[in-house]
Image (cartoon, grey):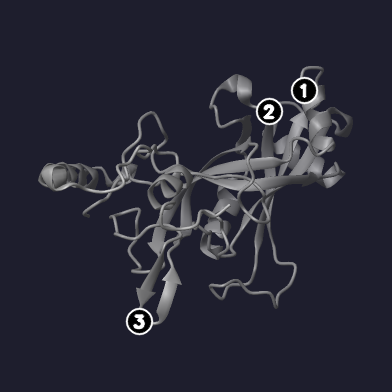
Amino acid sequence: PENDKRGIGEGVVKGLIQKSASVENQEVTEDELKLINKHTLSPLKAEEVFTFKIIMGDNELDDRNYEPFNLNALKDLKKLYIGKTMIKDHHRTADNQIARIYDTELVQENSTKFTGAGEIFTKLIAKCYMVKTSSNADLIQEIKAGIKKEVSTGCKPKHAYCSICGVDNTKEYCSHWWGKEYDTPNGKKICYFTLDGAKEAYEVSFVAVPAQPRAGTTKNYCEDKEKNLEPEETTENKIEKEKKQSKELELRMKMLDSFLFTQKRDLYDNWYKPRFCPVQ
């Protein structure tokens, strides 16, 4: 579509989305140990492991980046995340592996609490374990002390539906932008993209910058967008840019599986800040 500036990144996992989450305490019990030992080559004892919970996200619409999960996505991720690794800063190397998810659950604390989409408010929680060693003693202490608390999850959605036009943006572009207000037949409405279902769950990682209200951390789509956008088109270069955009769109439509969003926080601030108040 015209004026579409969303680019294709390099060196990323196709379709990867990073979602925010946070950490809570978790006690080691015999039942927990049985679940943990399903993922080990030799049985571990309770005194050898440190465990904790991760609140990986929920299905409320008030996502600060305007990309909420729905209940379908949480149900898929509940299955997909069991056995997945926890790493540092989303750098996918063996040395950065620090923990592993051994169990997940969906929690509905109040069956009368509903989201803006009419679903029962639900949280996805994962349980992780670490082996106590001298090399990770400081990290465990920081987790216990609440210093290392915010985490981000990486996954691939099945669909990303626009709240304005309903287009699935994992298959084709629509002309709407996250957080922008549009006139609709039912009045003014804020644009967001509902992540419906999940194909893959990749990893969990510690991060530092809060974004999601209850989870408290940042997320972004793992595909670089252009950051240095020109504020307006000019008459001289409009035709040339339209040709370029047409070629880019044709290429993207041939590479649908690699299409996804990323780092929209930077794009939103750079492109819309002059006309819209940034969401903090």
As displayed, is residue 215 above or below residue 135?
below
- Spot occupied by residue 16 in the image (x, y as percentages of width and height): 45, 42
Question: Which circle's residue, 3 or 1, is located before the other in the chain?
Answer: 1
Give, as a three-letter code, the residue at label 2: Ile
Instruction: Return the residue found at the far right.
Output: 47
Q: Is residue 208 left or right of residue 13?
A: right
Percent of width and height locating residue 184 = 36, 77
Q: Residue at label 3? A: 185
Residue at screen point 40% across, 82% down: 186
Question: CB under 8 Å between callouts 2 and 1?
Answer: yes
**Residue at image mark 2:** 98
Q: Is residue 91 or residue 178 the one in the foreground? A: 178
- Residue 222 location, x and y as percent? 44, 39
Horizontal and vertical percent position of residue 165: 33, 69
- The tag earlier along the polypeptide, 2 or 3, is 2
How far apart are the two marked residues, 3 and 1, measured between alpha carbons?
56 Å
Q: Alpha-carbon neighbours of circle 2 within 10 Å: few (<14), some, or many (≥20)?
A: some
**Residue 136, disc:** 1
Real-space CA distance between mark 2 and mark 3, rounded to the nearest whole angstrom: 50 Å
Q: Amino acid at mark 1?
A: Asn
Tell me the element at label 1: loop
Q: Amino acid at mark 3?
A: Pro
Q: Is residue 254 left or right of residue 61?
A: left
Among the two numbered marks 2 and 1 on one chain, the one whose residue lies closer to the N terminus: 2
Q: Secondary structure at mark 2?
A: loop
Side (left or right) of 216 relative to 46: left
Q: Residue at x 35, y 81 (%)?
A: 185
Looking at the rendered structure, the number of numbered marks drawn on it comes to 3
Residue drawn 70% across the image and 46% down it: 22
Residue 204 figure quarter:
top right
Quarter occupied by residue 229: top left
Q: Nearer the viewer, mark 3 or mark 1?
A: 3
